[in-house]
Amino acid sequence: MAIGPVQLIVLGFNHPEFHGEVIAELERLRQSDTVRVIDALAVYKDKAGEIEVEHLSNLTEEEAIEYGTKIGALIGLGIEGEEGIEAGAVAGAETVMESGLHVMPSDEEVWDVLAEIPNDTAAALILLEHHWAVPLRDAILRANGFRISDGFISPFDLIALGLHTAEEAKRLSVLEQSRNGR
């Protein structure tokens, strides 16, 4: 089975009020076979920067056993304190070595996910596989193409293209900044 492109999304929350809406939307995407949630963690960072981690996912029990805690291995985060963090880092390194890949990023490329989470907030770390992109990716590879870069586009950049109104972009920006404590 071909695995689609995988993306780690980190979403921040000030005083989160989860009512199941995020998980319900991920489940809807899963049922449509658009994406698959490989792993999801909720990370709570207190005022002193201490971290508490909770597994959060819409995976079935069998899938959770099969895939394990992939985010922890990917970012070197273990669930059980310092020993767990070390175990997460070791598991991530072993996975990379077993796959035959060499991914030693330069200092500019290192993404310290946990450091970016502000104190006294929560974050949802969601590792998604994009099923919809498999045929597109394969077509690109057959044409000798390759990924150079990717990223989300700001709503403000979409105004010039006519995909957002200035009012909508400003509303989204204000919401995001107010949630980000700015």
Image: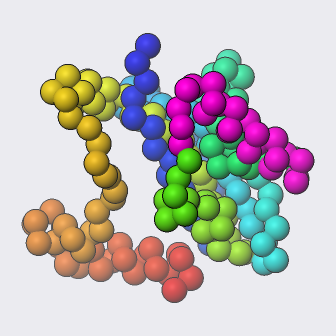
Predominant secondary structure, magenta span: helix
**19 or 127: nearer the eye?**
127
Taking the magenta stretch, the answer to whether it contains residue 95 is yes
- Of residues 11 and 14, the one nearer the viewer is 11
- Lateral position of residue 151 relative to residue 54, left or right: left
Question: What span is colored magenta in the figure?
Answer: 81-103
Could you tell me residue 82's position as x and y percent?
A: 88, 53
Q: In the image as oriented, which residue stretches furthest toward the top? A: 1
Q: Give the camera-side residue of 8 and 156.
A: 8
Whether residue 149 sits left or right of residue 113 in the image: it is left
Place of residue 39 in the rendered image (x, y in percent of width and height, measured from the top left): 61, 37
- In the rendered image of this protein, does residue 92 appear above or below residue 53? above
Determine the image quadrant of residue 117: bottom right
Q: How many marks are shown on the rendered structure?
A: 0
Residue shown at the point (80%, 49%) measured from the top left: 85
Question: Can residue 56 be seen by looking at this rendering?
Answer: no
Q: Does the rendering let one see residue 162?
A: yes
Decide which of 13, 88 is in the foreground and name it: 88
Image vertical order of residue 145 relative to residue 147, above or below: above
Magenta stretch: includes residue 45: no
Q: Position of residue 12 (x, y in %)?
A: 57, 65
Q: Residue at x 44, y 13 (%)?
A: 1
Q: Quadrant of residue 112?
A: bottom right
Q: Residue at x 78, y 72 (%)?
A: 49
Query: Where 161 sits versus 87, above or below?
Result: below
User: Residue drawn 76% across and 39% down?
Assistant: 90
Q: Position of residue 149 (x, y in %)?
A: 31, 52
Q: Quarter-wise, where is residue 136 in the image?
A: top left
